[in-house]
Amino acid sequence: MTCNNNILTGKIISTIALVCVSVLAATSAVSASDREDQLIERIAPVGNVCIEGEECGGVVAPVAVASNEPRSGQAVYDSACFACHATGAAGAPKVGDAAGWAPRIATGMDSLVTNAINGVNAMPPKGTCMACSDDELRNAVQYMVDGSQ
């Protein structure tokens, strides 16, 4: 039995050695220049930074120009208000819930906008939109009211 184990072990070692020699032969077939090129390609940056006004050497994406106009009510709602007013979180009236909005709408648009700006109950000032202008908050309130009557 010992003899057979030694023969089997020898065959396994020979096979492993053959595989190693084959791998080494394959990798040595790649020239040093090719390996350097592959290395440079692997560590190359994924992008370039272009400074406005300087030649970039490629196609430059157009720069978005910010509008001086306030965002629409839906844009503000979609970016900031929906988290609470779509789910009813913290007691916020859901958009589309006419019964939930009716007593609030009865206080008047100015009151609703004042509450949106200053906060009311669990809603903090400006809700979750600290970057919103008063006009944008008014647009968002109007959007929610229009969708809840």
Image (cartoon, rainbow, N blue to C red):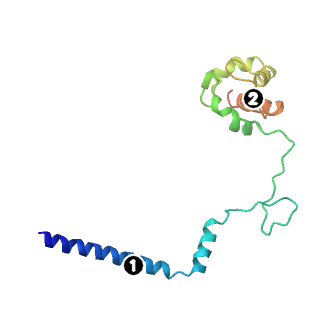
The residue shown at (69%, 38%) is 78
Where in the figure is residue 31, as x and y percent of width and height? 56, 82
- Say which of marks 2 and 1 sits in front: 1
Relative to 143, residue 104 above or below: above
Where in the figure is residue 23, as x and y percent of width and height? 42, 76
Image quadrant in which you'd find residue 51: bottom right
Q: Residue furthest left?
A: 1
The residue shown at (75%, 29%) is 141
Q: Which mark is residue 21?
A: 1
Query: As rendered, which of 2 and 60 lies closer to the eye?
Result: 2
Image quadrant in which you'd find residue 69: top right
Relative to 28, residue 93 above or below: above
Query: As rendered, which of 109 and 123 lies closer to the eye?
Result: 123
Where in the figure is residue 131, as x and y percent of width and height? 78, 35
Q: Earlier in the sequence, mark 2 or mark 1?
A: 1
Q: Amino acid at mark 2?
A: Val
Query: As rendered, which of 123 and 105 lies closer to the eye?
Result: 123
Q: Which mark is residue 141?
A: 2
The residue shown at (33%, 73%) is 16
Q: Rounded to the nearest whole Å, what is the CA distance between mark 2 and mark 1? A: 74 Å
Q: Amino acid at mark 1?
A: Val
> Where is the N terminus found, in terms of image quarters?
bottom left
Whether residue 95 appears in this view of the structure is no
Relative to 39, residue 76 above or below: above
